[in-house]
Amino acid sequence: MLVNAETALHRFCARILGWTDDPEVAVEQAIRSIELAADHSAALVLLGETDLVPIARALHRRTLGPEQPFIVADPDRRTVRASVRSPSNNASGLAAFQAARGGSLCVRAQRLPDDFSAVVALARDPGASVQLIVCADARFDTHPFVTLPVPIRVPALATRASELPRIIYEYAIDAIEELNAREECFTEADRQWILKNAPWTLMEIEKATLRLVALRMSKNRSRAAARLGVAPVSLTRWLDRRKARPVLVLDLSASLQPLERNSPSATRGKHRSHR
């Protein structure tokens, strides 16, 4: 793994796990589990009380890369192709496994496909080239089959209120780099807006920071929507569901300083993440 990619993965793991209760140990354990899954030596298990599929998808992007397939096998959802909003899903585990060749197959422990036993047989083949990710709720924490490698326990965002400003800061840096924007395209006013409007899940925060950066760097909403790969009406509806209008607050003097130069949230290394 390249230095920049390794540093980015370390930062992201710290972001989803938190910066309290000896975070370095938790992050190192998580990275070891991720490495084993990426090498097809073990399944990657995520535990938490929220929908963990978006986090699984984010880890996939940071390890195998966004160009590799990420497929969900959920029998309770219809078979659909990937979109900006959600990953590809197939109700059939076998069909999902074949589509995931070279990438990741993600399942929810509470909603396994009917043919999951056949999926397990395929996944045990060393030449299968499919990373298996299992998302489960916290009650699986003491299940004997998730003893090793160590599962990644994602704490509820509600327990991390004091860390929300820092979480938003980290996602803002990712958004600025992903969209190749100037640092002035995310301000302290934007961070406060997100704190009021979108602190429900990590992925909602990620979406909000990306959209606010796109809005600030674009002349109008249509151009912002094009940068994001969404329909202009979707972006407008997203804003309309939130009474505040961030594009009207243009206090560029309040822009955030680069994380590595002036922030307590920098983790290991001095490199920025590059997706």
Image (cartoon, helix red, strand yellow):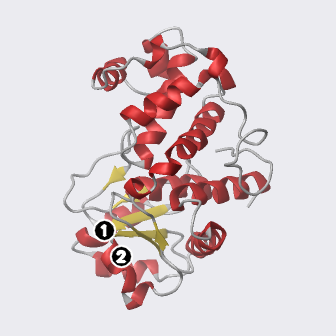
Q: Would residue 64 be visible to someone looking at this image?
A: no
Whether 239 is drawn above or below 18: the answer is above
Q: Position of residue 53 (x, y in %)?
A: 38, 57
Kindly state the secondary structure of the residue where label 2 is placed: helix
The total of numbered circles placed on residues is 2
Q: Look at mark 2 in the image and give the residue it sits on.
A: 119
Q: Position of residue 227 (x, y in %)?
A: 52, 23
Instruction: Indicate the quadrant containing the N terminus: top left, top right, bottom left or bottom right.
Output: bottom right
Of residues 31 and 22, the one nearer the viewer is: 22
Whether 228 is drawn above or below 75: the answer is above
Q: Which residue sits furthest front?
A: 162
Question: CB of mark 2 within 8 Å of CB of mark 1?
Answer: yes
Whether 159 is drawn above or below 133: the answer is above
Tell me if 14 is positioned left or right of 162 in this view. Answer: right
Residue type pointed to by label 1: Gly
Kindly state the secondary structure of the residue where label 1 is placed: helix
Question: Neighbour class for label 2 at 10 Å: few (<14), some, many (≥20)?
Answer: many
Whether 187 is drawn above or below 33: the answer is above
Of residues 89 and 164, the one nearer the viewer is: 164
Of residues 248 and 53, the one nearer the viewer is: 248
Instruction: Indicate the quadrant containing the C terminus: top left, top right, bottom left or bottom right.
Output: top right
Q: Which residue is drawn at 35% across and 76% down?
A: 119
Question: Neighbour class for label 1 at 10 Å: few (<14), some, many (≥20)?
Answer: many
Q: Where is residue 194 in the image (x, y as percent from the top left)?
A: 44, 33
Q: Quadrant of residue 198?
A: top left
Tag shown at residue 93: 1
Of residues 76 and 47, the one nearer the viewer is: 47
Q: Would residue 187 be visible to someone looking at this image?
A: yes
Q: Where is residue 153 in the image (x, y as percent from the top left)?
A: 46, 70
Q: Residue at x 37, y 32 (%)?
A: 197
